[in-house]
Each structure stands twice: as C-alpha cells, then as structure tokens.
Image (tube, rainbow, N blue to C red):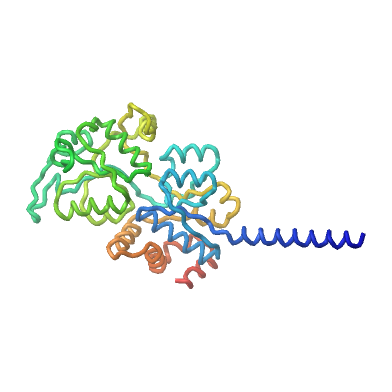
Amino acid sequence: MSRLRVLLASALSSFGLALISLSSQAATAPIHFADLNWESGSFITETLRVIVEKGYDLPTDTLPGTTITLETALAKNDIQVIAEEWAGRSPVWVKAEAEGKVVALGDTVKGATEGWWVPEYVIKGDPARGIKPLAPNLRSVWDLAQYKGVFKDPEAPGKGRFLNSPIGWTSEIVNAQKLKAYGLSDSYVNFRSGSGAALDAEISSSIQRGKPVLFYYWSPTPLLGRFKLVQLQEPPFDAQAWSTLTDASNPNPKPTRSLPSKLSIGVSKPFTQQYPQLVSFFAKVELPIDPLNKALAHMSEHHQPPRQAAEAFLKANPQLWQGWVPAEVAQKVSASL
C-alpha cells in the first residue's frame, strides 16, 4: 500500500509539472501578427508590435501570406492580428465576421481611400517638363475606352494597360471585375504586379519619366503624397453591385465605386478573450492621415525597415499614441525608445 502511495504521488507530481510546463509555454507563446506586404500595412504592424512587446511585455512574431489566406488564418486563430484590415471588403472576412470568428477593432485611419488614378500631367500636361496633355477630357472610368492608345500596353498592341494589385489581394479581384463592369476588358490588359513594391516601382518609374500610366492605388501611402495624381470618377456606391465585384466567379459584375474605406485592426475571437487589455488598446488606435503619409514617405525614400520607421514615429509623436494605452504602458514604451 505504501509503495502504491509513492507511485501515485510520483505520478501526480509529474502530471503537475507537465501542467506547469504547458501553462508556461502558453504564457510565452507569441502573438502572431499578419506579415502585410504593403508599406502602410507593414508600418502599422510594427507600430503595434513595438507597443505590445515593450509596453505589455508580450512576445510577438509575424506570419506571411496573401490577404485572403491571412484572413482565413485569422478566422482559425492560426494568426491573431491583422494590423490593417480593410474591414467588410472580402467575402472571407464578411463570412468570418458573421460567424463571430473575427472582430474589427477601431477606426484606425480616417481619410483612407482607394480607386483608379492617373498622373495629373496626363490630363493637364506639364509645361515645365515639356509634357503636353494626352487625355485632356479624361474625367471618369467611362472615358478610358477612348484613351486606350494613351496607356498602351507594350506587349499587347491595340490595348491599354491597367496596373492592378498583386494576385492574392482582395482589391485585385475587385479591379478585375471592374474592368468587365466598365466595359474595358477588350481594350485594356489586366496587368498584375508581383508585389506591392513592384507596383510602386512601375508607377514611380513611369511618373519620373513623364509617361502615361493608369493604375489602382489607395491611401494611406507615400505615393499619393509624393506625386500629383487625379482619381478617376466612378459610379456612386451600390451595395448590390459591390457584391458582384468581390465575387470573382460572377460572370456579370455591375459598376460601382468601392465600398467606403474603413481601416480597422482585425483580431481573432479567441484573442479578444485572452488579451482584453490589448483589445482596449487596439480599439483606441487612430493614425491621422497626414502624419501617417509623411512617415510612410520618409520610410520609403530612406529605405527604412518598417520596425525602425515605427520606432522613429513613436519617438517623434508621443502625443499621437500615448492616449491609446495606460500611463504605465506608455512610460515603458517611451523608455524603450
């Protein structure tokens, strides 16, 4: 009987140590952020990570993927945070939100926008650079059919080129459907860049050479602050038409401008239960568009890593972020900078 007690005590002790080990592992498991591959996304991600790590003493890491795969991972809690979520845009997000698997926190960037753009000199010319107006009557997407020769695709004679988002972005699907809805499928090539950086490089190179270029873009971004651009008019927003644009399989998409932009921090449902202190923090995040675009432009022009740019932004703008967190958290973050 005594030997049985010893064996039982030993087993219970081992079980207890195992529980402690598992609990310790859970406590130190990093919070997985989506590794967003566009400038504002990576910048906001690193801004949040710095505060979480330095202010709340919680480890984080990042996991890469396309917008759609990351939203799918968030719904499964394989990742916990998407720092720049264009909430309500993709069917994956809408479905996951309706099922209570993901939550959009805050309204992080006021003044965000997206659409189709051309350089101002395409419409007005630029005498200082010796550029004459090439599309003086271009105002809306409906005018593009008559100007396909202006934006000609070097690899497809007789067609213009539209620079779309990279494959895997929700906006890439929307823009492909818009080309059909605006009757431009036969007159424009739907050109998809390999990455956000490649899209930026193509646009910037064209503008610096004074060439006409038609492209999808969004704000917050450094590009919109760096060049004089004109956003083309689109039909007023229509929710039913929008649903046909987000569905890549819809054979008859309807014309409409994109859903009004609301940027939030997307989190998984389990995250809200495990980290209520971070939910409170994320819900208060607000980044004014002008300081944000300036920070992004500086990051881009000086080839700063996003982490370094985020730390510099936090150090230079304490008045913007210290109200998001308790005073003791703000003090710890400031001390780390």
Q: Relative to 82, does residue 328 appear above or below in the rendering?
A: below
Which image quarter is the N terminus in? bottom right
279 or 150: nearer the viewer: 150
Horizontal placement of 322 versus 271: left or right? left
- The quarter of the picture where residue 262 lies is top left
Horizontal placement of 8 versus 19: left or right? right
17 or 101: nearer the viewer: 17
Residue shown at the point (44%, 37%) measured from the top left: 91
Horizontal placement of 312 versus 281: left or right? left
Residue shown at the point (15%, 41%) measured from the top left: 152
- x then y, percent, for residue 51: 48, 63
Q: Relative to 182, does residue 324 appear above or below in the rendering?
A: below
- x then y, percent, for residue 247: 39, 33
Residue shown at the point (38%, 65%) measured from the top left: 313
- x then y, percent, for residue 87: 43, 44
184 or 278: nearer the viewer: 184
Total label count? 0
